[in-house]
Amino acid sequence: MKKYIIALDEGTTSARTLVYDLTQNKIINIVNEKFKQYFPKPGWVEHNANEIWEVIERTMYQAIKEFKIKSDQILGIGITNQRESVVAWNKKTGEAVYPSIVWQCRRTSAYCESLKSGLKNYIHKTTGLIVDAYFSASKIKWLLENNAKVKKLLAEDNLCIGTIDSFLMYKLTKGEQFVTDTSNASRTMLFDIKNLKWDEKLLKKFGIPSSILPKVVSNGQKLGVAHTKLGDIDIGSILGDQQSSLFGQGCFDVGLAKATYGTGCFILSNTGSSPLHNKKMLSTIAWTINGQTTYALEGSIFNAGTVVNWMIDDLQILESNKVSSEISANLQDTNGVYFVPAFTGMGAPYWKTYAKGAIVGLTRGTNKNHIIRAGLESMAYNTYDIIKCMEQNGVSIKELRVDGGVSRNEFLMQFQSDILGKKVIKSGSSECTALGTIYMTGLSLGAFKNIHEIKKLIETSHIYTNKMNNKVRLELIENWHKAVKQTLGE
């Protein structure tokens, strides 16, 4: 009996393998290993893709070995990954020939700024994205123009370039499958999200031959076979990490939204079978199952968990996330203090790349605890701004499902519910990203008959409901918006 699903969760700072037991419907093992971050120049961020593959292999074999699992007991493998980061590799050897350019890398910012006057509207309409160095297109262009090894492989018709998932698929299948899925393709700024194909006009503009890009496939089917030293194992899923979290949270219906509070905060809402265009939000593909595509609106908050880390590590006014919850709950309010944490600019719905952070409303009566609470509240206000912006498209967001490390902060989750005036539902699992690709693998390979079976597996640990007076809420939100305008010099 095949009773296990293996999830390969390749993140920005570490890679993990998780083992899911289908008979117990739970994750029974997690093996995690960090890999090195490289910052060769200001604003540049790189990874060694060959090292990432080695870490993936090590964690996979260790996680399977610890439970003495045989390959014929494994139903399949699912992949979830950091999005937008790109890898260039040798088609014949499968070796990466240049460091992976990470989604955080800003080396192509000036080039992207130069595109805005001519291609901004076309890119938004076609790909659902804004013009930004965050996405893959300009990174691929940079590789093609600036690296001798990449140029040589291109001339020899021996070059592959893709997002991390396509590299892992290539390595797992020993070069048999050079594919990506629609959720990852939709983050490249090269993909027509309505017609589900690489856009010829954008490929030409960026100087990218379609022959070096992966084939784009749907989930809901076997995607390939991993040739491991344990034996052959089917691969049943590829999902970008945030879309995988949306799936893992069970946001299968229009109007269901999730927020993952990690280093940043990523908010996605299910918008159904048609892409919705919102000038301040990203429209992205959530997933495609057997040719049927579900879309999402996405808003990114660049700094969430970093606010807590900054107060712990740099200001040294705080011991832990848990203590920040206790301190904040024991205060009546912030004494008029608002914290706008634009450490690396502001994301949705403001999109101010060069903004700097600010703490507004300081008086002689301000103490460190007011700043701590204001730091937590900033995440809730920014999430409110994104949800309200999404609702301008006519999608009524009924509730917010939450996961990620900062979602363990009791004060923040209650305040989030108060500011939204909606239920905030905390997941029963801290592994929603991995669960998304696990559930998708099970659906693709026959462990689950349909999405309704998966719905029954979604667990909730706590439901927060609004306790705030509407007049108080509106006043707090108004003052937050004043603080943002002051920070942005508007």
Image (cartoon, grey):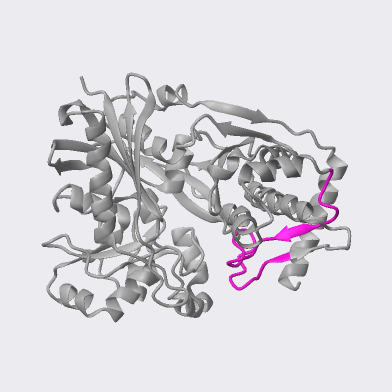
196 sits to left or right of 328: left
150 sits to left or right of 33: left
**Image coords of residue 300 (percent x, y):** 56, 55
**Image coords of residue 317 (percent x, y):** 69, 56
Count the labels in the image.
0
**Image coords of residue 166 (percent x, y):** 27, 54
| Quadrant the N terminus occupies | top left
Observer-nearest residue: 444 or 406? 406
Q: Residue at 74% of width from left, 44% of height from top?
A: 327
Residue 349 lies in the magenta stretch:
yes
Q: Is residue 441 above or below residue 110?
A: above
Residue 378 in view (yes/no): yes
Image quarter for residue 221? top left
Q: Is residue 278 above or below residue 330?
A: below
Image quarter for residue 79? top left
Observer-nearest residue: 329 or 47? 329
Chief secondary structure of the magenta portion: loop
Residue 47 lies in the magenta stretch:
no
Observer-nearest residue: 332 or 112? 332
Q: Residue at 40% of width from left, 60% of height from top?
A: 84
Q: Residue at 59% of width from left, 38% of height from top?
A: 408
| Quadrant the C terminus occupies | bottom right
Q: Is residue 471 above or below residue 375?
A: above
Residue 215 in view (yes/no): no
- Which contiguous range is marked in magenta? 332-358
**Image coords of residue 319 (percent x, y):** 63, 49
